[in-house]
Image: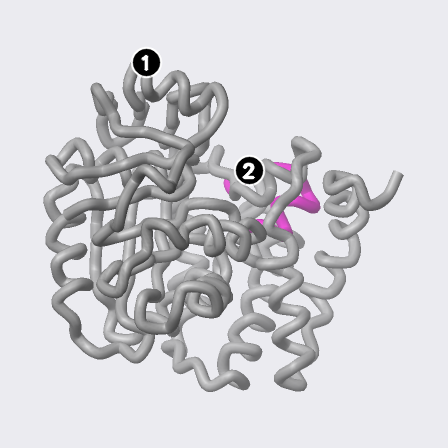
């Protein structure tokens, strides 16, 4: 398959790198020093699942020269998705499937508004990875997992073909869930809580989960997101909270969420797509979300400062 990775960051770089390592035809969309380093030295990935280098990696910043993709993996930040959708037009043909791997639950809607409902799948991933330097991705935590599927949950050959490609990747677990929307919300319940609480207390997950007060805050944030999901008709298992806390308890203690790292570094973050989305969707569904409203309200000035909207 011809796979274009739009956004060669921690997510796109890792999963795209694994696909290239397993023999798929992968083209990385990158820019600046990151692009230059990939072109000159390949894409280097240091991973707890085994280090590797994609030598002679195909990389560009000019989508007009890429041609039509079979699959486009979207690895940009959630707030960059609308702009990415416009930029991706030259590589999306009638049979291209576009798979968002962002945090949050709104990326498929944003992509479909530009690229068409028929081109977009639902998708998500789990991994702790980031750009360590130009041309260099570091995976430090969480077993790599990727899931995707048609938004109406029908079986499709294109989704199955992509599943087979990921199944050949060393160290990657892949599945087509029976309900992709529910799978995306299950991750959203987790990531919005751990990102928001982590960005406020500014400690890794090991400290967050071990202090009773922050552990309780995590659980209350998850309960709110679960209530919003239920009000929106998303069917999540009754044991979602318990399983999510068990997942958190098994994470490497030094792990942090990408939104937390961005806010701590003074960079624009996914606040609107995570805690802001819980507040916004909860308001639309008539569900109170006081914990997420508290988190969102306290983090918003930092977000606005990072975007140059306040002094």
**What is the CA distance from the residue labelled 1 to the residue labelled 2?**
35 Å
Considering only vertical position in the picture, is 172 above or below 109? Answer: above
Q: Which quadrant of the figure has residue 309?
A: top right
Q: Quadrant of the C terminus?
A: top right
For mark 2, give the secondary structure: loop
Q: For residue 166, say whether it is visible.
A: yes
For mark 1, give the secondary structure: helix
Q: Looking at this view, name the residue that lies furthest to the top.
A: 40
Q: Mark 2 points at which residue?
A: 204
Q: Position of residue 6 (x, y in %)?
A: 39, 43
Q: Where is residue 202 in the image (x, y as percent from the top left)?
A: 66, 38
Considering only vertical position in the picture, is 6 above or below 158? Answer: above
Q: Where is residue 183 in the image (x, y as percent from the top left)?
A: 36, 67
Drawn side of residue 275 relative to residue 59, left or right: right
Q: Name the residue under label 1.
A: 40
Give the overall secondary structure of the magenta segment. helix
Q: Which mark is residue 237?
A: none
The residue at the point 55 percent across, 79 percent down is: 227
The residue at the point 57 percent across, 40 percent down is: 207
Q: For residue 105, say whether it is visible.
A: no
Mark closest to the chain's N terminus, 1 or 2: 1
Considering only vertical position in the picture, is 140 above or below 227? Answer: above
Drawn side of residue 287 relative to residue 177, left or right: right
Graded by Cα atoms within 10 Å as few (under 14), some (14 to 19) or many (20 or more), the crowding at tag 1 reads: few
Looking at the rendering, the stretch of residues picked out in magenta corresponds to 194-206
């Amino acid at each position: 398959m011809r796979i274009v990775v739009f956004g060669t960051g921690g997510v796109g770089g890792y999963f795209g790198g694994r696909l290239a390592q397993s023999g798929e035809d992968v083209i990385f969309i990158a820019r600046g020093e990151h692009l230059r380093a990939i072109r000159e030295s390949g894409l280097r990935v240091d991973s707890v699942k085994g280090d590797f280098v994609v030598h002679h990696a195909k990389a560009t910043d000019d989508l007009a020269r890429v041609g039509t993709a079979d699959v486009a993996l979207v690895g940009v930040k959630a707030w960059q998705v609308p702009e990415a959708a416009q930029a991706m037009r030259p590589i999306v043909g009638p049979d291209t499937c576009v798979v968002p791997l962002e945090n949050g639950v709104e990326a498929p809607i944003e992509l479909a508004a530009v690229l068409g409902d028929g081109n977009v799948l639902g998708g998500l991933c789990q991994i702790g990875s980031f750009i360590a330097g130009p041309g260099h991705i570091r995976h430090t935590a969480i077993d790599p997992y990727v899931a995707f599927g048609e938004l109406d949950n029908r079986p499709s050959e294109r989704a199955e073909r992509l599943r087979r490609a990921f199944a050949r990747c060393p160290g990657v677990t892949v599945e087509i869930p029976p309900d992709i929307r529910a799978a995306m919300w299950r991750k959203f319940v987790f990531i919005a809580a751990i990102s928001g609480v982590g960005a406020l207390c500014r400690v890794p997950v090991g400290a967050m989960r071990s202090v009773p007060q922050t552990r309780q805050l995590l659980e209350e944030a998850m309960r709110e997101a679960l209530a919003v999901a239920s009000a929106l008709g998303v069917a999540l298992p009754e044991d979602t909270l318990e399983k999510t806390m068990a997942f958190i308890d098994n994470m490497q203690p030094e792990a942090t969420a990408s939104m937390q790292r961005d806010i701590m570094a003074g960079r624009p973050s996914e606040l609107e797509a995570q805690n802001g989305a819980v507040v916004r969707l909860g308001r639309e569904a008539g569900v109170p979300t006081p914990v997420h409203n508290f988190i969102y309200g306290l983090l918003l000035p930092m977000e606005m400062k990072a975007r140059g909207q306040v002094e």
